[in-house]
Amino acid sequence: MSNATREVLVAGVGMVPFSKPSAGATYDELGRTAIQLTLADASIPYSLVEQAYAGYVFGDSCCGQRVVYGAGMTGIPVINVNNNCSTGSTALYLARQAIASGAADCVLAVGFEQMNPGAIGSNYADRPSPFTDFDKACDDLVDVDLPLALRYFGGAGREHMEKYGSTINDFAKIRAKASRHAAKNPLSVFRTEMTEEQVLAEQLIWPGVMTRPMACPPTCGGAAAILVSRDFAKRHGINPLVRIAAQAMVTDTPSTFSSKSMIALVGADMTKRASSAVYESAGVGPDDIGVVELHDCFAHNELITYEGLGLCEQGGASRFIADGDNSYGGRVVTNPSGGLLSKGHPLGATGLAQCYELTHQLRGSAEARQVEGVRHALQHNLGLGGACVVTLYEKVVV
């Protein structure tokens, strides 16, 4: 947990509509447009940006420079960031550290991804995989022949079913909820509403555990944020309405493997540690949170994350879902954007797309998705391998 020494404000956010891999836009177009939208939102020129952190997973070295140079070539440091699915939030984490420490007053975090269709695989078969230990642990616990991501998160979901009595219907309810939220988001890749019954009637991937819509799709997209200090905001006459109240980034501990649990293997322990650190640092608790953007790469992970973030008690996710406490009119609105399941999951951009959504929620500018009366918003971004970033945003009282 990093203790900020200076207030960190979100001055601007921008995001392009997410799209299927066949849509045609290239990563540099996606990232550049996101930066331009963010600068316009912040009402500052690119010449004031002092550092840039560029997040992506699929691409050659220095893609970040290619993207950032499209907005301007001012000679600033450009740092390329890759941390699997938590890449976007890792870029945000580094940008926040630069502001909080006093190293800079205006920092850009941008994430982008140009993905290919189909399941994600390794690009380097001639060397040890960073997932070797994870794959071995998964092999010991899961005995189905499926692509790895499906085995990991489906296996975690199956474990929750066996331990706590959750069912495939719970996952279907989550997926249906995502579609209802995404129908109100013009930036989502999927905007067609689905019912629980329709989700269950789709192609079966893992009998009793998963149908196809319960897994997020490969997606292309870009999103960005500009963070500034309070002094910078005053000097340039801007009035950001959102601040980062607390943030934590954690990685795996030995319990990821020693617990012999698929739920732990996919990062639930990291989620608990990161969120606990954030709550303690900010002096708030789960009951203070009005809206959450969490890492629903699979409906199964959303269910597990309800418990990891403390939104409900351990083993209480099924009741939380059945009571409608995860949507409008309930205890906390989860993934009003549609989440990864419907909005899409371009790996490098996801964390910054979450930042975009929550910033608009706290500003009161989320339009049809707006959660009323929200003062605190929580972001959860997880990457296998592993890393988890949890960020708490707070509405600035003017």
Image (tube, rainbow, N blue to C red):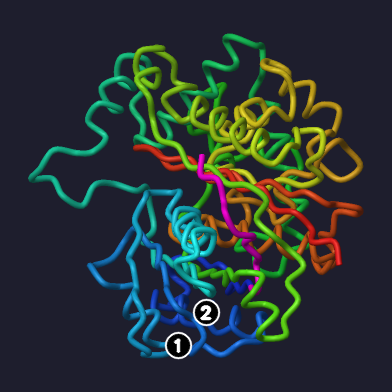
Q: Are marks 1 and 2 in contact (CB under 8 Å)?
A: yes
335 sits to left or right of 88: right
Q: Quadrant of residue 287?
A: top right
Q: Is residue 226 magenta?
A: no
Residue labelled with disc 1: 71
Residue lying at the far top in this picture: please name it. Answer: 163
Residue visible at 61% across and 48% down? Answer: 391
Residue 309, horizontal then vertical, whole percent: 65, 31
Q: Quadrant of residue 16?
A: bottom right
The stretch in magenta equals 1-12
Q: Is 263 above or below relative to 291?
A: above
Residue lying at the far left in this picture: please name it. Answer: 126
**Dot 2 amino acid type:** Ile
The local crowd at label 1, few if under 14, some if 14 to 19, many if 20 or more residues have their Cα within 10 Å, is: some
User: Mark 1 and mark 2: span between their CA atoms?
Assistant: 7 Å
**Dot 1 amino acid type:** Ala
Residue visible at 66% across and 84% down? Answer: 235
289 sits to left or right of 93: right
In the rendered image, the quadrant that contains the C terminus is: bottom right
| Element under disc 1 | loop
116 sits to left or right of 298: left
Residue 211, horizontal then vertical, whole percent: 56, 35
Residue visible at 58% across and 17% down? Answer: 160
Q: Is residue 7 magenta?
A: yes
Looking at this view, is 12 or 366 the one in front? 12
Residue 243 tag number = none
Mark 1 or mark 2: name the one nearer the start of the chain.
Answer: 2
Residue 151, horizontal then vertical, whole percent: 40, 29
Q: Is 270 above or below relative to 318?
A: below
Residue labelled with disc 2: 35
